[in-house]
Amino acid sequence: MNQKVDHEEKENLTEEQIAEAAAETAEPEAAAEPEAAPEAESAAEAPEEAADKKDGPSAEELAARVAELEDQLLRKIAEFDNYRRRTTKEKEEIGLTARIKCVSELLPILDNFERALKIGCSDENFFKGVKMIFDTMTAAFTKMGVEEIEAEGKPFDPELHYAVSRVENPDLGANVVSAVMQKGYRMNGKIIRHAMVAVANPD
């Protein structure tokens, strides 16, 4: 009988031990659950950091960038204005050079017509035709800006005149142009052809 009681007590103790072992196993698991809290906090902070990144540059950075872009724009505008003025001037110079070359090729023809008018002609109608051509060429040159260089009676200027002879003339001063052998012309301040002259009383 006593052996039967002891066997029941042993079975009861075994059940209690099993319950205690189960309780000890559950406590560490329950204690481990709160460790997930930092991850939740990190997850809560993540949207705030993302929001900060979405805000972009600060107002000071944007203002500095705008000032930099305005400075670059002003520089580009100035460079373009300089380029435009330079190219316009170059085009004008090229056009002037082309006109000067064209006029210089036609000047001998004008000289011949002028000589023909000085000689005269018995045929009045023919003479009028020659004069008409001469006047037309002269008007065209004037329209293009061609000017005759003043020479006779003016002081000799090597920039405008080309001396081909020297004469002594008491009625004129020193280094004065006494006669013009061939007229000179200029256009827009540039010499097309120097005037061929005789200089009186050279030094």
Image (cartoon, helix red, strand yellow):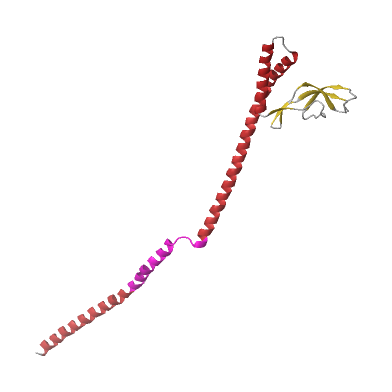
Q: Residue furthest front?
A: 124
The quadrant in which residue 109 appears is top right
- Magenta highlight range: 35-60
Depicted 119 relative to depicted 64: above or below: above
Q: Position of residue 166 (x, y in %)?
A: 85, 22
Q: Position of residue 75 (x, y in %)?
A: 58, 49
On the image, the x and y values in percent for residue 176 come to 84, 27
Q: Position of residue 47 (x, y in %)?
A: 38, 66
Q: Residue at the spot x=30%, y=74% of the render?
A: 33
Q: Is residue 19 left or right of residue 131?
A: left
Toward the top, the furthest residue is 122
Q: Quadrant of the N terminus?
A: bottom left
Q: 126 or 52: which is nearer to us? A: 126
Q: Is residue 82 magenta?
A: no
Q: What is the magenta segment's predominant secondary structure?
A: helix
**Nearer-the-camera pick, 119 or 157:** 119
Q: Residue at x 33, y 72 (%)?
A: 36
- Look at the image and tell me whether residue 105 can be seen: no
Relative horizontal placement of residue 94, taking residue 67 as reference (left or right): right
The answer to whether 63 appears left or right of 26 in the picture is: right
**Residue 54 included in the magenta stretch of the image:** yes
Q: Residue 46 appears in which quarter of the rendering? A: bottom left
Q: Residue at x 20, y 81 (%)?
A: 19
- Out of 90 and 64, give the one closest to the viewer: 90
Quick check: 120 left or right of 49? right
Q: Which of the image's four quarters has the C terminus?
A: top right
Q: Is residue 127 above or below residue 15?
A: above
Instruction: Residue 187: name its quadrant.
Output: top right
The answer to which of 169 and 175 lies nearer the viewer is: 169
Residue 12 visible in image: yes
